[in-house]
Amino acid sequence: MMEVLQQRVALITGASRGIGQAIALAYAREGAQLALTARTIDALASTAQQVQALGRAPQLLQADVASPTDVEAIVRSVVEHFGTIDILVNNAGIAGPIGPLQENDVSDWIRTIQVNLIGPYLCCHAVLPIMRQHQRGKIINLAGAGATAAWGNMSAYCATKVAVVRLTETLALELQGTNIQVNALGPGSIHTQMWEELRDQAQRVGDSALYALGQRVTSGGGASLERAADLAVLLASAATDGLSGRLISAVTDDITHLPHAVPRIMASEAYLLRRVDLA
């Protein structure tokens, strides 16, 4: 079976667990060379061991994606190690403060913006010159439920996720004609450590709806981690060349036939953030 990401170099942020780890393993199976980041090198141990078991030798990098200095350093290190960066997966993210906006800790709210929005911006800013030089690239920004629906008591998270989708759309327009595609991936509500924390914080602030959702997600009723990783492979592969500036959902969209649907998707506004005016 052909490895669809063979010899491609992928930089994945927040790769220590959850969705980032699942994407790293899926990319390793498809032949990619991996550079993996987390806040600490030790946090990457489990992912590294599993990637190595698949016959790959990942580069492990410590970085706070909200730090321009850290981001510039890891990108420079990846290029020195592998020679290029073909794929960027902006996965690192946090839930931020849970509760009414006026009761949120201001520094926690701002930190959410720094990690979830400024982090992807910094990574794109650092990686794009390399992709332009090599005249190819795939950028995948992780969106979330906050991108398409407002959730009470999660103002920071929702604001960042909708902003990431608009950043994706805007950057795609700027990259037209460069053979660099950028898309947002909606993974759905997957049972990760973040959702366990969300569930517990929702209970603390008395948000019964969010707590009930958290209970369902963490009790086996969440979205598929494997399906999100499969979509990440598709968006990084040549199968989706031409698809750019779109939000693709691993939960609601037909990802099996996604490559064949690229012309239709690019001709539609259904995969964009748009106001719908009723006649």
Image (cartoon, helix red, strand yellow):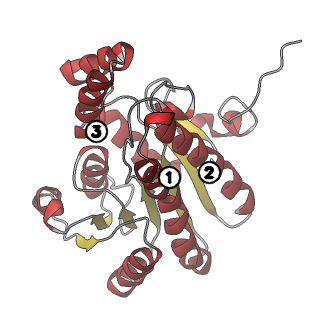
Q: Amino acid at mark 1?
A: Ile
Task: Of the two numbered discs 1 and 2 on the same chain, state the one appearing first in sequence.
Answer: 1
- Taking 115 as reference, is 202 left or right? left
Q: Secondary structure at mark 1?
A: helix
Q: Residues within 10 Å of mark 1 (few under 14, many from 20)?
A: many
Foreground label between 2 and 3: 3
The answer to whether residue 7 shows anywhere in this view is: yes
Quarter the C terminus occupies = top right
Q: Secondary structure at mark 3?
A: helix
Q: What is the tally of numbered marks visible in this picture?
A: 3
Residue under numbered circle 3 = 194
Residue under numbered circle 2 = 168
Task: Of the two numbered discs 3 and 1 on the same chain, state the one appearing first in sequence.
Answer: 1
In three-dimensional space, the C-alpha distance between marks 1 and 2, rounded to whole angstroms, equals 16 Å
Residue found 25% across the figure and 44% down from its top: 18
Residue under numbered circle 1 = 113
**Nearest the camera: 105 or 150?**
105
Which residue is the extreme one toward the right? 279
Foreground label between 1 and 2: 1
- Taking 72 as reference, is 246 left or right? right
**Nearest the camera: 140 or 179?**
140
Q: Residues within 10 Å of mark 2 (few under 14, many from 20)?
A: many
Residue found 63% across the figure and 39% down from its top: 262
Q: Amino acid at mark 3?
A: Met
Query: Which percent across, then down, holds residue 264?
Result: 70, 33
Query: Which percent across, then down, holds residue 107?
Result: 43, 53
